[in-house]
Image: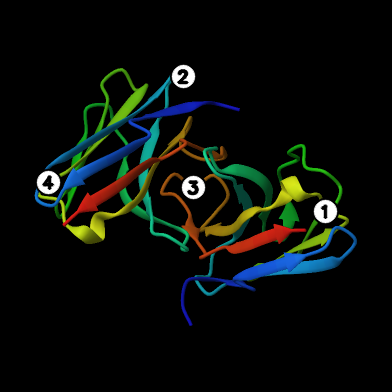
Amino acid sequence: GQQLNQSPQSMFIQEGEDVSMNCTSSSIFNTWLWYKQDPGEGPVLLIALYKAGELTSNGRLTAQFGITRKDSFLNISASIPSDVGIYFCAGQQSGTGNQFYFGTGTSLTVIP
Amino acid sequence: ETGVTQTPRHLVMGMTNKKSLKCEQHLGHNAMYWYKQSAKKPLELMFVYSLEERVENNSVPSRFSPECPNSSHLFLHLHTLQPEDSALYLCASSQEFGANYGYTFGSGTRLTVV
């Protein structure tokens, strides 16, 4: 299967700081998704991206579809304790009929 | 209830036991998935059902056996598991197989094989 590399693997930040993470692949994807997984729960969809260069926000979260179509980025502004969790990227290689491939996740810890 | 519901939330089983995981979705979706989540690894797709027909044939050991009796229910039957099968098993659904707006996940079953 396709491999998606997420960076960094883990982050420890102070409350109020901004966060940046990314996801890269050796293959081109047509759709990028970002999920968040709280401890003991399943992943929840945060943002979906469908076009190269697209920038989409969801509250304090902003994600971008890389122009090479091989990467995506997620930023969180003014972090708060409830941002703690694991953030996953997922990529799909065509519009329909194909599975999503998931990254290994970025674990975020916010120190109050 | 809404969304995707998985039961049980936690399961401890011996290597000779037989158990089943259950997933139910109340979203009217036509596709359902089983994923395995192990520490430090990407989510691994195990099985996919679309309109109750299995559509993906990933290499999963035969000690895992899926069943999809209707489009709202999905089971994962387990027998003679190994300790390395301990993981979080996630069920997900989507409107149709391969839809590009992603999946809705359940909360998972934390499985420990002893």
In this rendered view, identify the residue nearer to me: B111 or B92: B111
For disc 2, the marked residue is A27
- Which amino acid type is marked by label 2? Ser
Measured in 3D between alpha carbons, the distance from the residue under mark 3 to the one under mark 1, in whole angstroms, is 32 Å
Residue at (61% x, 62% y) in the render: B110
* The C terminus of chain A: image quadrant: bottom left
Residue A10: % across, % down: 34, 38
Which chain does the residue under circle 1 lie in?
Answer: B
Which chain does the residue under circle 3 lie in?
Answer: B
Mark 2 surroundings: few (<14), some (14-19) or many (≥20) residues within 10 A:
some
How many circles with numbers are drawn on the protein?
A: 4
| Tag nearer the camera, 1 or 2 | 1
Residue at (69% x, 46% y) in the render: B46
- Which amino acid type is marked by label 4? Ser
Residue B70 appears in the rendering: no
Measured in 3D between alpha carbons, the distance from the residue under mark 4 to the one under mark 1, in whole angstroms, is 44 Å
Residue B102: % across, % down: 44, 49
| Tag nearer the camera, 3 or 1 | 1
In this rendered view, identify the residue nearer to me: B109 or B99: B109
For disc 3, the marked residue is B99
Tell me, for residue B81, which label it has, or none.
Answer: 1
Labels 3 and 1: the sequence-earlier one? 1
- Which amino acid type is marked by label 3? Ala
| Tag nearer the camera, 4 or 1 | 1
Would residue B57 be found to the left or right of residue A37 on screen?
Answer: right
| Tag nearer the camera, 2 or 3 | 2
| Tag nearer the camera, 4 or 3 | 4
Measured in 3D between alpha carbons, the distance from the residue under mark 4 to the one under mark 2, in whole angstroms, is 29 Å
